Image (cartoon, rainbow, N blue to C red):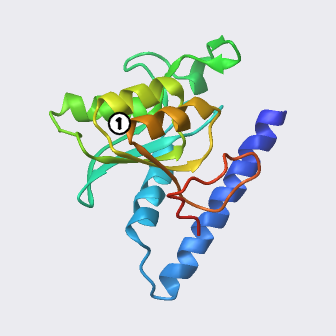
Amino acid sequence: MSDDRELQKRLEEENRRAEEAGRRMASGKRVDWHTYFMNIARVVATRATCDRKHVGAVIVRDKNILSTGYNGSIRGLPHCDDVGHDMVGGHCVRTVHAEANAIIQAARHGVCIDGADIYTTASPCWECFKLIANAGIKRIFYGEFYREEKVFQIARELGIELIKIGAEEEGDHPPTEGDISR
């Protein structure tokens, strides 16, 4: 029952954001690049196949989209939405996370992402952060905090920027120095 309430709350929030974007469009104002790419990440998240959390990621360099990804099952295997979750330690492990899928998609198509930025609807988990760092991505723009404080500490050590986009939400990590909250 709580999953239904969480989904309803998420849909209401996404509708609010879409209405806000519509008002900006109606006023003739263009959104800035960060909002543009984060909006695309939110649309990509609608393809996610695990109803526990819908996450989207967009890898960008020089204002060009290089790759996208969303959380979903291993290619060719059934989705959580179809067969249920594979829970380990309170987390569904059936899916590949959005950030990993975006990196994999770039690799499958021979796209270099070294020095790029990633826009993701949730801050990366530790496993995805390690992939992002080793892929050479220099800035991570995220929409909401997702459980891994360690990522922020290690990112500072490595010189990788973690930048929160959007209004501070309850339970989120405090904004970083590079916060571009609206």
Q: Is residue 46 visible?
A: no
- Which amino acid type is shown beneath numbered disc 1? Ala
Q: What residue does disc 1 label?
A: 102
How many numbered marks does the figure carry? 1
The residue located at (45%, 28%) in the rendering is 128
Residue most toward the front?
Answer: 157
Q: Quadrant of the N terminus?
A: top right
The residue located at (78%, 39%) in the rendering is 4
Depicted 20 relative to depicted 11: above or below: below
Query: Residue 37: percent from the left, percent from the top?
Result: 40, 58
Query: Residue 26: percent from the left, percent from the top?
Result: 51, 85
Mark 1 burial class by Cα count in 10 Å: few <14, some 14-19, many 20+: many
- Relative placement, left or right, of 114 versus 84 is left
- Relative placement, left or right, of 109 versus 71 is left
- Relative placement, left or right, of 156 versus 144 is left
Q: Secondary structure at mark 1?
A: helix
The residue located at (45%, 84%) in the rendering is 29
Query: Residue 35: percent from the left, percent from the top?
Result: 46, 65
Q: Is residue 156 visible?
A: yes
The residue located at (59%, 69%) in the rendering is 182
Residue most toward the bottom?
Answer: 27
Query: Residue 165: percent from the left, percent from the top?
Result: 54, 58
Q: Quadrant of residue 76?
A: top left
- Relative placement, left or right, of 47 versus 122 is left
Residue most toward the right?
Answer: 1
Depicted 4 relative to depicted 139: above or below: above
Q: Nearer the viewer, residue 131 or 35?
A: 131
Q: Quadrant of residue 83?
A: top right
Q: Nearer the viewer, residue 122 or 39?
A: 122
